[in-house]
Image (cartoon, helix red, strand yellow):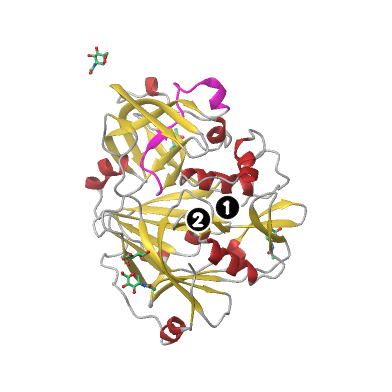
Amino acid sequence: MARLLPSMLSVVLSIGWAAAVPTSRSPNAGTFTIDTTRNPNYAPNGPREYARALAKWQIEIPETLAKFGVNRHSGDVAATPFADDREYLSTVGIGTPPQNITVDLDTGSSDFWVYSSETAQTDLGNRVRWEPAKSSTAEKIPNSTWWIQYGDSSYAYGNVWRDTVTIADISVPGAVVESAMDVSFQLSTDEDLCGIFGLAIGLNSRVIPSQPTVINSMKPLLDAQVFTSDLKWHAEGTYSFGGIDSSQFTGDIRYVPLHENAKYWEINVTGVHIGDASVWYLFNWSSIVDTGTSLLLMDDDVVKAYYNAAPAAYYKAKYDAWVYPCDTVLPDLELGFSHDNTVKIPGRYINYTALEGTVCMGGLQSNIDQGFSVLGDIFLKAVFAVFDYDGRRVGFANKVLN
Ligand SMILES: *[C@@H]1O[C@H](CO)[C@@H](O)[C@H](O)[C@H]1NC(C)=O
Ligand SMILES: *[C@@H]1O[C@H](CO)[C@@H](O)[C@H](O)[C@H]1NC(C)=O
Ligand SMILES: *[C@@H]1O[C@H](CO)[C@@H](O)[C@H](O)[C@H]1NC(C)=O
Ligand SMILES: *[C@@H]1O[C@H](CO)[C@@H](O)[C@H](O)[C@H]1NC(C)=O
Ligand SMILES: *[C@@H]1O[C@H](CO)[C@@H](O)[C@H](O)[C@H]1NC(C)=O
């Protein structure tokens, strides 16, 4: 539960940033980058994103919200012509010669699965699919399957292959590719997404019998076993593999150790500061850094405290979500990882999408008291993040925000 404590942390902070661990690598050596575009065609649907985020993390979805997850056409008819930061898509090549497939790089899962020539036509829509028959290096793994089931009964399953996978100019021979045979409605509504590229640190994929994850196959080929994300608010961002590009951030990288034996990029958030309040809320919350979730999910107490600082905001039962008139100026939100490691998310980054008319929905929503936070793209846009496999840690650095 939230405890309101005197502003000890802000006193410490006012002394200034203490340099944490310095960048250990020379910039750009062996660093491969991949652009991540915002999906330009997708009309975002805030409630559906929220339902998806809860489903992904196996959190029970409130009944009213649940219906936004399953309506096949709800995303396409949303009255929101502008493109918000619903997801960030990157291109990977599969096969020889490489077939370019648009995927979501997802630190919150471990499977690399794609739509393919094996996928049922009704699920495919107009997607570009991977065609193993057109790859000279594709090889089916006999008697092997994969199956994903989320909390909202959405699912995907299929066959398992090996092929050369090219990401950010790095070729990974014999990488395991999960080919979808069937994908449920909830997952197939987004036609620009042709696959998921899982980057979790210690989680097995859902391949049975077990096979190496794509990141485990890729790691030995990297100069340094790290990748970084520089997602941007309403703009194209970058993922880099194998090194840290110092042109993407300012100051020092401040590292936070992962939980022991963590399967996900799981760290503790230790404090929250809202707007220009004179106090920090101090906690110890387990939090998962997840590029594959659009929203920021936190403890109900924090979410309430945050929207209380924006007096026009209110909880709308119809959507099971916090909303406000679109002209509301939301306060900034700072997350603390230690006394000298805080990240400030500008209020405008938290303004997620218009819902109906002039009502907007926030990108910070409740985790329904599940005991852990999900630090999704709303958070990641505000920071340069380092995912360090060897060091088992996540690093944050400031960057110039747009
Ligand atoms: C695939 O993407 C790469 C990198 O963006 C590009 O150089 C190449 O031309 C693309 N190939 C095809 C067949 O579109
Ligand atoms: C695959 O499974 C079938 C049926 O269980 C079995 O006959 C066959 O030997 C298996 N193939 C391999 C390569 O394991
Ligand atoms: C969080 O837990 C760590 C380890 O038990 C402890 O050292 C730290 O003081 C705790 N922080 C807060 C704010 O409770
Ligand atoms: C994280 O927080 C939990 C309490 O929620 C605490 O038990 C644990 O020691 C903390 N871990 C670290 C690495 O601070
Ligand atoms: C919040 O976002 C909506 C949708 O992008 C936009 O129309 C609105 O102007 C934004 N509000 C503010 C205060 O910037």
Q: Residue 309: x percent and y percent?
A: 63, 72
Which mark is on residue 377?
2
Which mark is on residue 281?
none
**Residue at left 54%, top 21%?**
121
Q: Taking 181 as reference, is 78 left or right?
A: right
Q: Quadrant of residue 361?
A: bottom right
The image quadrant where one finds the C terminus is bottom right
Residue at numbered disc 1: 85
Q: Taking 258 as reference, is 347 left or right?
A: right
**Residue at left 57%, top 52%?**
85
Q: Residue 18: x percent and y percent?
A: 35, 81
Q: Do the CB atoms of the residues marked 1 and 2 lie less than 8 Å apart? A: yes
Which is more toward the observer, 167 or 205?
Answer: 205
Q: Categorize mark 2 by other alpha carbons within 10 Å: few (<14), some (14-19), many (20+).
A: many
Q: Quadrant of residue 304?
A: bottom right
Amino acid at dot 2: Asp
User: Magenta segment range?
Assistant: 108-125
